[in-house]
Amino acid sequence: YLNKLKAKNILDDKNKNIVTSVSKNGIELINQILIGLSSKDIRGLVDKGTKTKDNTIIFIISLEDQKTSIGVGISQNLTDRYDAANFAKKISIYLGGKGGGGRKDFAQAGGGSSTLEKAKEALNKISEEI
């Protein structure tokens, strides 16, 4: 219960849940940076966004206790053109990690200790590849 309450408080706080959404080449790109959300909560957020919409790619970075967690989701209709595992690995390496893994529609990775600014840079850089 406490973990769910903590996650809800983070998602409701605009200072801890920084979301930008842009349309690029007919694809909705959702970039989300979360402060303090655990890595296990990322999957639910990614699934919520990609399972209900087509033409959507979600990049999530969570900064928690000197640890960076990364989640990437790609709606099913885009998996023939994009690979979530590839994106997760690139973001991880940019943030000082060693990569990650997963499937074409969902992947997670870890990064080193990172900052909000570095996370924003990583999302901007990966968004350029779409």
Image: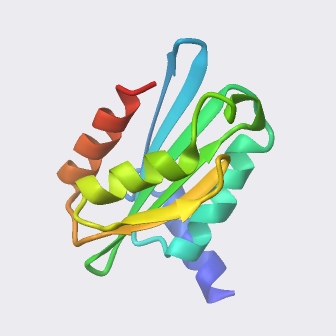
Residue occupying the point 68% across, 62% down: 44
Residue 118 in the image: above or below residue 63:
above
- Is residue 106 depicted above or below 112 in this figure? above
Between 102 and 19, the one lying in front of the other is 102
Q: Nearer the viewer, residue 81 or 124?
A: 81
Task: Where is residue 127? Give x, y as percent.
Answer: 39, 31
Q: Is residue 61 left or right of residue 12?
A: left
The colour mode here is: rainbow
User: At 35% from the left edge and 51% from the top edge, which residue is drawn?
Assistant: 91
User: Which residue is most to the top?
Assistant: 25
Left or right of 100, for residue 58: right
Is 47 rendered above or below residue 20?
below
Q: In the orientation shown, which residue stands out farthest toward the bottom? A: 2
Please give the count of numbered marks on the rendered protein: 0
Q: From where the camera sits, is residue 3 visible?
A: yes
Q: Nearer the viewer, residue 121 or 96?
A: 96
Give residue 20's position: percent from left, percent from top.
44, 34
Residue 25, image x, y percentages: 53, 12
Residue occupying image coordinates x 25% and y 78%: 66
Q: Quadrant of the N terminus?
A: bottom right
The answer to which of 15 and 20 lies nearer the viewer is 20
Furthest residue toward right: 52
Residue 93 appears in which quarter of the rendering? Answer: bottom left
**Residue in the picture at 39% in, 59% down:** 16
| Residue 69 in view in this figure | no
State the image coordinates of residue 30 (x, y, percent, origin top left): 52, 36
